[in-house]
Amino acid sequence: MMQQVCNLRVRGAGKSYGDFSLRDVSLDVPAGTIVGLIGQNGAGKTTLMKAILGTIALEQGSIELFGRAMEDITERELPEIKGRVGYVSAVTAYPQVMTVREIARLYELAYPRFDRSAFEELCSTLALDTLRKPIKDLSRGMGMKAQLACVLASGADFLILDEPTAGLDPIVRDEVLDVLRGWMKDEQRSILISSHITTDLEHLADTIVLIDNGSVLLNCTADEIGAMGLAHLRAAELEELLADSSYAPGSLHVLKHELSYAVLIPDRRAFARAYPAFALDPAGIDEVMTLLVKGEAR
């Protein structure tokens, strides 16, 4: 069987900072896919992204970019590899006195594959008409658009996006997501995106990876999450469910509320057939994350 091409492969990543440790984190970002990275603040998402970008060194594990282990990439090869990776920060961390056009010129000098015509087209698509304004005078939305226009025109094959839609109004968010979808029409490209706005990921990501307290709690496809359900049970109903031998020990996550229990169900359609009288809703990414992080495995 032919192995799927991965633009990013992480295996057993570990890194410690004082009381915090990133522990045995593994994930793949195959070409042609978008992987959503979720978790609470301080869960380890930023540490993982820094390791992928090469700004911090792992203590354990390995990272491959485009099939090459990072430690095996030579100084001569490094510019070409780095030129294929684009990074969009949660903040517009450009020199505040420079204009968007001047920033684009820096990208053009730094990235051999920078496409000036693609940059101009992206500016038009994103209604980025402030090319002569300094960065300090841009709104949050315009700053994010400027980052995207520069990064997407740089010739990257793999994007790392850190909260790219945080703080944006719904119209600008939709514009940003549409541009990313268009960029992904090239099936050799891929994205790793961290976001607290899980509704964006529900419409964008192929795979969801949940990190909590430095460890991966969930790594599954969007379709698998779409099949999950959230049951709302009374105590007697919960006991009946836990006695059902078709659910392996630890496969159900239970969160106690004041008058009921929320239960994460792996397959809501099978559950609905077996327990038609029990209250059941579809489970979104928010509900899945809450039950896995705060619930008890039963």
Image: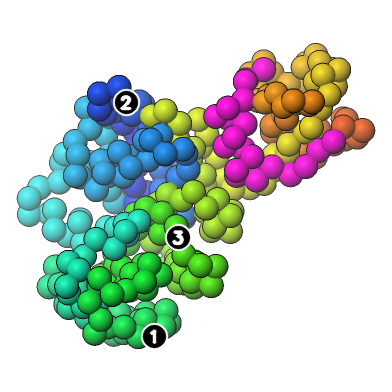
Which of the two labelled residues, at mark 2 and mark 3, occupies the earlier sequence position?
A: 2
Give the vertical position of 31 relative to 267 (above or below): below
For mark 3, does the 10 Å Cα neighbourhood hold few (<14), some (14 to 19), or many (20 or more) residues?
few
Q: Is residue 248 visible?
A: yes
- In the orientation shown, which residue stands out farthest toward the left? 75
Give the vertical position of 165 relative to 231 (above or below): below
Give the magenta-colored segment's residue range.
279-298
CB atoms of marks 2 and 3 within 8 Å:
no
Residue at 46 percent of width and 38 percent of height = 40
Q: Which mark is residue 124?
A: 1
* Front label number (1 vs 3): 3
Which of the two labelled residues, at mark 2 and mark 1, occupies the earlier sequence position?
A: 2
In percent of width and height, residue 284 lies at 65, 45
Residue at 55 percent of width and 50 percent of height = 198
The amino acid type found where label 2 is placed reads Phe
Q: Identify the image quadrant of residue 80.
A: bottom left
Residue at 26 percent of width and 44 percent of height = 50
Say left or right for 171 vs 15.
Answer: right
